[in-house]
Image: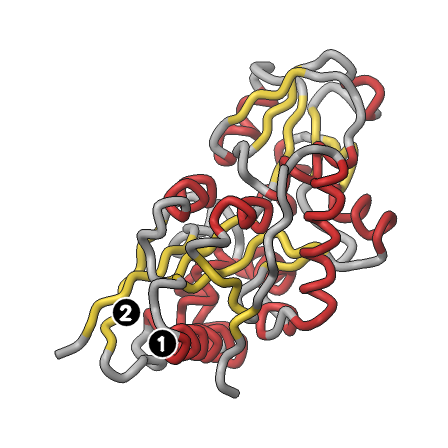
Amino acid sequence: MSREVVFGHSPDSDDAFMYYGIASGNISLKGYEISHLMEDIESLNLRSEKGELAVTAISVAHYPKVSHNYQIMNCGSSVGRNYGPILVSKNYKKLEELKGKKIAIPGHFTTSYMLFQIFIEIECEVEFMHFESIINSIKNGKVDAGVLLHEGQILFQKDGLTKISDLGELWHENTGLPIPLGVDLVNRKFDEKTRKDLTTVFYKSVKYGIENEDAALKYAMQFGRDLSFEEARKFVRMYVNSDTLSLGAEGRDAILKLFNLAFEKNIINQKPVIDIMHPKY
């Protein structure tokens, strides 16, 4: 009898793309029935605090709060190399113009907000909201600016918005490292062999998607937002690539650097141990 395990991921094109190998039935794990739960990343961040899911995507910034429940997998990370979440506005073009203004942030526990706190040193009013609401909130004047992630990073100009700052670029200028924005975790309630098996099946799913890109994109676009096929390809390649197959030593160093900077700025009060679960290759 198969044992059911649930993988949690966001409905974004890149996350759905990674899951395609499993969803299509081409990748499986003997003795297990894998199902998936799709929620926005902030909901997954909060759910991870309860340790409910076998495997889940989260914002890497939230890992200090859940490291007792989960171990980071070497595969599945969404990594930006000199790009990342962007700060945009309709009416303002320079950072100093946002002093005292209201800025929308896509969740308190997101890496976007951690990077914002580290690098954006202006007095402003922060409003947390669902990431899908941010563009319209800027356009209708509810907020003066906002931090965009996911597909908004390549669609903002279509909505008449101006990029003021790229938090991924600021990160790279200051550290020289890539920025892991999201990671996938495996639950520590499983023994080491099972954690490795779950990590391996997800690695194989990511690899299958990369090797069967068009089919994986067609699947992923069911969940994406307002992207053409080629826009979806561009976005997915930004965050599903060799870094996704292997976080590697550089990715681990980047996570440690992020938490060191957050600790120095009193954003977090303790730094977690970073122990990585590797798949069987």
Q: Quadrant of residue 219?
A: bottom left
Of mark 2 and mark 1, the one earlier in the sequence is 2
In the rendered image, residue 216, in percent from the top left (x then y), is placed at: 45, 70
- Mark 2: secondary structure: strand
The residue under the point 81% across, 44% down is 170
Residue type at numbered disc 1: Thr
In the rendered image, residue 179, in percent from the top left (x then y), is placed at: 70, 55
The residue under the point 67% across, 72% down is 248
In the rendered image, residue 9, in percent from the top left (x then y), is placed at: 41, 55
Between the residue at mark 2 and the residue at mark 1, the CA separation in whole angstroms equals 13 Å
Q: Which residue is mark 1?
A: 194
Who is closer to the viewer here, 247 or 228?
A: 247
| 198 up-or-down from 227: above or below | below
Q: Quadrant of residue 264?
A: top right
Who is closer to the viewer here, 16 or 74?
A: 74
Q: Which mark is residue 9?
A: none
Q: Quadrant of residue 85?
A: top right
Left or right relative to 70: residue 33: left
Q: Residues within 10 Å of mark 2 (few under 14, many from 20)?
A: some
Q: Which residue is mark 2?
A: 34
Q: Are marks 2 and 1 in contact (CB under 8 Å)?
A: no
Q: Residues within 10 Å of mark 1 (few under 14, many from 20)?
A: some
Left or right relative to 230: residue 67: left
| 234 up-or-down from 94: above or below | below
Q: Quadrant of the N terminus?
A: bottom left
Left or right relative to 53: residue 63: right
Tag nearer the camera, 2 or 1 = 1
Q: Which residue sits furthest top? A: 100
The residue under the point 69% across, 64% down is 251
| 157 up-or-down from 203: above or below | above
